[in-house]
Structures are given as C-alpha cells and as structure tokens.
Amino acid sequence: MKKLRMAVCTAIVLMAIGSAANAEEFSPKRIVSLDGGTTETLFALGAGGLVVARDEGSTYPPEAAKLPAISTGHQLNVEAILALKPDVVVGRNRSMSGPGMHILEQAHVRVVRLPDDPGIEVAQLRIKNLASLIGKEEDAKKIIESMQTDLDRLEEKKKAVSGEAAPRVLIVYLRPGVVMMMGEDSNAAAMTRLAGGRFAVPGMKGYKELNAEAAVAAQPDVILCYTEGLEATGGADALWNRPGLAETPAGRARCLIAMDDLLLAGFGPRTGDAALQLFDRLHGQGTTVAKAHP
Amino acid sequence: MTRTVPYKLVFLILLAALPIALCVAAGMGAYSIAPFRIPAILWDRIEGEGYRVLLYIRLPRIFLATLVGTALALSGAALQSMFRNPLADSGLIGVSSGAALAASAWIALAGADSRIGLWGLPTAAFAGGLATVWLVWRMARTNGATPTATLLLTGIALNAIAGAGIGLLIYCSDEEELRGITFWQLGGLNGTTWPLVWAALIPLVPGLVLLAPLGRALNALALGDREAYHLGVHVAAIQRRIVLGSALAVGGAVAAAGGVGFVGLVVPHMFRLLCGADNRWLLPSTAVGGALLLLGADTASRTLAQPAELPVGILTALAGGPFFLWLLLRHKREAFHA
C-alpha cells in the first residue's frame, strides 16, 4: 500500500516536472515551501535564495527561519501565498491537502507534491525531484553521496553491535498536560529502526495519549523525544516526574534522548547524519543524554 | 402515582458497590498484575515493578477518580436543587468554563516556555474556575441578595464569553497547542500522582464538607426561595454555601482531571428517576453514584485502548448516556416530577 502510494506520488511529481520541462524550460524564481524538510533541501541545494516563504516548521538552516512563515500547520492562507506571486508551491503530500491547493492551481501556480513516506529511498527521491525542479541535479548528487557515506558508516557500526540486544525505544511527544506516544508508522519510529533501535510498543500506530502503566509494561530502555517539546514542558526533570516514565528501565537509568524534530523526523538532506547521531546516542556510552543539540 | 424504589435500598446498594468497584479497578490495568496477588503485594511491600506500578500509578489514579466523581456529582445535585432547574450543573456558575478558559490560555500562551512544569496547568485551571464563580456571584448580586434567576442568567452569559475566549485561543494556537486544549477539555486522570491527589484534596475536602449536609435545606429551597425563608431556612447563606462549596469541589476536580463532563448533570437525575427528589437521600447517593461512574469510566479509559488512553470524558458520556436514556424512557411519566 505504502509502496503504491509512493509510486503514485513519484509519478505525479515526475509528471509535474516533465510537463514543466516540456514547456519552455521552466525554472522557478519564487518558491513557497510548505514543509521543513523541503525548505532544508532547497537550501542545501543552494537554492535558498529562491524561497520567498515557508511554513512554521521550516526552522533549519537558520537563514530559512528568517523567511516569512505563511502557514501554521493547520491553516493555509492562500491569499497570502498568492500575494507573494510564487511560481511554485512545493511541499509534502500531508501539508498539501485541503481546498487551498486547488485554488492555487487555478491561479496558475505550479503545485508540486512530494511523497511523505519516511525512509532513505524516499528521502533521496525527494532530493532528486526537488533538484530537477530547479535544475540542480549535480548538487543533489553530492548531497546523496554524502548521505550514503553516512549510511555506510552506520551499517558498519550496526554490524559491530550486532551481538547486543537492540535498545527498546519509547518515542514520546510532550505537550503541556499530555504525554503522547508516536506509533510505529511515525517518521521518528522509522528513524529509530534505521539507527538500530527497537520500537517499544509494537503494533501501536498513529499518535495517542500514553497510558502511564503501559509505559512501564513496554519496558523501554530509552525515551526519545523532540527537543522543542521537552523544553516547552519543563525539561528532563518534569519528564521524569510524569507518572509511569520514572518506573521504566529508561527512567531508572535516566536515559533520555532529545533531538530536534526536523533532524530526527524530517528525512531531509541530513537523514544519514541524523541516523548516525541517534545510533551513537542509543549505543554509545553517552546514552544518558538529558539534552542534545542538533 | 410513583412507582419508585425505596431510597435506603438504592443508597445501600450503591454503597456496597463502591468497595467492589474499587477492588475491580485496582485489579485491572495495562501493566498486568494478578488481582489476587495485590493484597500480598501491598501488605508485604514486595518491592518491585509491580509494587511501584500499583502504588505510584494505579492507586493514586483510582483514589482521585473516586474523589473527582463524588465532587462533580454532589455539586451537580446541589446546584440542580438550588436553581430548581434540571439542566443545571457546575457549568452554570461558571466554574467549569472559567477553568477551561484558564487551562486553554495556559496551554496556548504560557505553555510554550513554562518552567513551572506539571503544576502550572492545574493551578491555572483552579484559579480560573474560582475567579469566574466570584465574577458571576458579584455580578448577579443585587441589593444584598442574589436572586437565583439572575445568578443563572449571569452564569450563562459568562459561559458564552468564556466559550468565545477558548475559541479565540484555539484560533491562535498551533497544532500541538490545539491538541493540548482538546485533550484537556475531554478530561483525563492519566497524569495522577500522589502529590497531585494531596493538592486536589485541599479544595475538594472543604467543598464536599460544605455541600454534603445540605439535604434538608435543599428540600426547603425546592419549594421556592420565599417559602424556604418562611420555613426558617436562611436562603442567602445556603446559596452562598452551595456556590462556594461547588466552586471549591468542582474547581479542584476540574483542575486535577480536566473537563470531565456529564457526571454532574446526569448522576443526580439517575437517582431522582429511580427514587425521587428527597435531597436528604439524593445528596449521599449521588456522591457515591458519581464516584462509581467515574471510577468505571476511568478504568475503561486506561484499559480499553492500551497501550493508549481513551479520554475519560468520552467514556462518562458513553457509559452514562444510554443508561440515563433507558431510565428516562422507562419513567417518562415520573420524569416530569423530578
């Protein structure tokens, strides 16, 4: 199912780009990016200057965060986008739903949808797709090569620890008053598997409030969360004060890994780097990291 | 022509059901502990994961569910009798909506850089609830008295304003804050720790103590403010006591458990439909009934969707609604007298 969706998305992207290529060498001058990973990729390709607006999740690199934010996740201001006179609006499928896109297309703005799915192949595919949209195929090759180098190193490191039991990872999402857990279909879970961790609540999908007892029953060795959520909810001390988490093996050893959400779950150009970082924290002696910087 | 069940019987059945429900609740959970080992675990203090799960996660939660259910149902019963309005509940004096507004504001505005951790949200909710009740009370006061009708309408008006405030906050909040607000409004006892239980007891106990002995006075009030006065009831003092008691009890309950709806509205009606409206029996029975409903709903909320949580507000409505409807249809005729 996922594969099919991916294939369809790829086809759509390729068609969009193909038709662009047919019509008088389309090269965008003003791009609106509606997704953090996409913005990051555009900057990595050296096309940051073309981006005129971003969504709120586009926080990396720091120059991207200075651009005007046009959408706030659940709301898309179509008029504000049109006012910027973009020639391309690009993002991942999830951020491109809703009637707004249709209006943009009617206004002859090219809407490019990239596939959502996590994973290395899709991450590389997205970079290639974006590169061919702006004619930066060479830069894409470099990014993908360096990603591959990281991933090869990761494979070696994984082989070195293949005798040990993989650490069980519980991925939580912290908001004031609620601890949510992210399911095995989340990007963060995909990154965890890539980095050699074991998902602690197999079968859990989506995005649900975590039952305190179930956290203990899952017996996680590590709690993984986003840096932003951890800081917004009072840091590591407040986390261990939540009922349940302190009683887990991770809680007793105070094993907490916090990573920037775009790095951990973006599956953008830093995918290989992120997987290496997570691997080191999961397996290295420095597992007891209370706070980590991207 | 009433075909009702004796008061005493229903009260005793409810009272007998409570310890059974407590034991069942203690024996269920996402972390499996054999129910028959629980007494041994607690008695011998067998240190280990099971003991800690039971003592630090499950028991405080069960305890708080019982208390919150009692507080919501009791204040609902008292307010319905005082307003002589079957639709009244703690929402009408503004405590629930005020707490919801303050909690939403906390999540949307302060939540982003709060260092106060776990205590900020309940404190804000409690303060918001109390402040709103005070506002309703002050505005409804005319010439030293507080006519019930004015109090009711003031409450409705402030509810609407608080609702608009919450709407505005939802509009301003990002996706995660939105989720926080929504989940708070559905209620939940997942975050319960002993310190939270002790903190909740500070307003809950005085609130319950103020409300519980009011049966006789409420019976007099049911006849009308003037009639009650002639029966020797100090109407203004009783009103003040009910409003203060409800504000403390519901404020504490909502601060600890979020916006658990339905309990305060429906549990008193269940008892009225079964037995009748004598407040001397209604108040204690409703208190126990509310505890039972919330205990049951919370047990379901932490076990049905494991390892996830179901918001308890959904379950109180889901469990109580059909039962209430069944009672209503069976006692259609009596319902008009209730």
Image (cartoon, coloured by chain):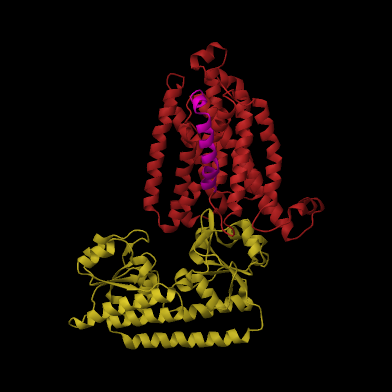
Chain colours: A yellow, B red
Residue displayed at 50% across by 27% down = B335
Q: Residue furthest top?
A: B230
Instruction: Judge from the rendering whether residue A101 lies leftward or rightward of residue B109; answer left or right.
Output: left
Which quadrant of the figure contains the N terminus of chain B? top right
Q: Is residue B162 above or below residue B61?
A: above
On the image, which quarter does residue A279 sit in?
bottom right
Q: Looking at the image, can residue A131 be seen?
A: yes
On the image, which quarter does residue A252 sit in?
bottom right
Give, as a single range, the part of the protein colored magenta. B312-338
Does the segment drawn in magenta span residue B326?
yes
Residue B314 pos. (x, y %): 51, 47
* Overall secondary structure of the magenta section: helix
Does the segment drawn in magenta span residue B314?
yes
Return the residue nearer the eye: B326 or B191.
B326
Residue displayed at 52% across by 48% down = B121
Q: Is residue B114 above or below residue B315?
A: below
Residue displayed at 39% across by 37% down = B160
Residue displayed at 64% across by 41% down = B66
Residue A46 pos. (x, y %): 33, 81
On the image, which quarter does residue A24 sit in?
bottom left
Q: Residue furthest right?
A: B44
Residue A267 pos. (x, y %): 44, 75
Number of marks in the rendered image:
0
Q: Looking at the image, can residue B67 be seen?
A: no
Instruction: Judge from the rendering whether residue A3 lies leftward or rightward of residue B189; answer left or right.
Output: left
Q: Is residue B42 above or below residue A125?
A: above
Instruction: Judge from the rendering whether residue A202 lies leftward or rightward of residue A130; answer left or right.
Output: right
Return the residue nearer the eye: A159 or A204.
A204
Residue B327 pos. (x, y %): 54, 33
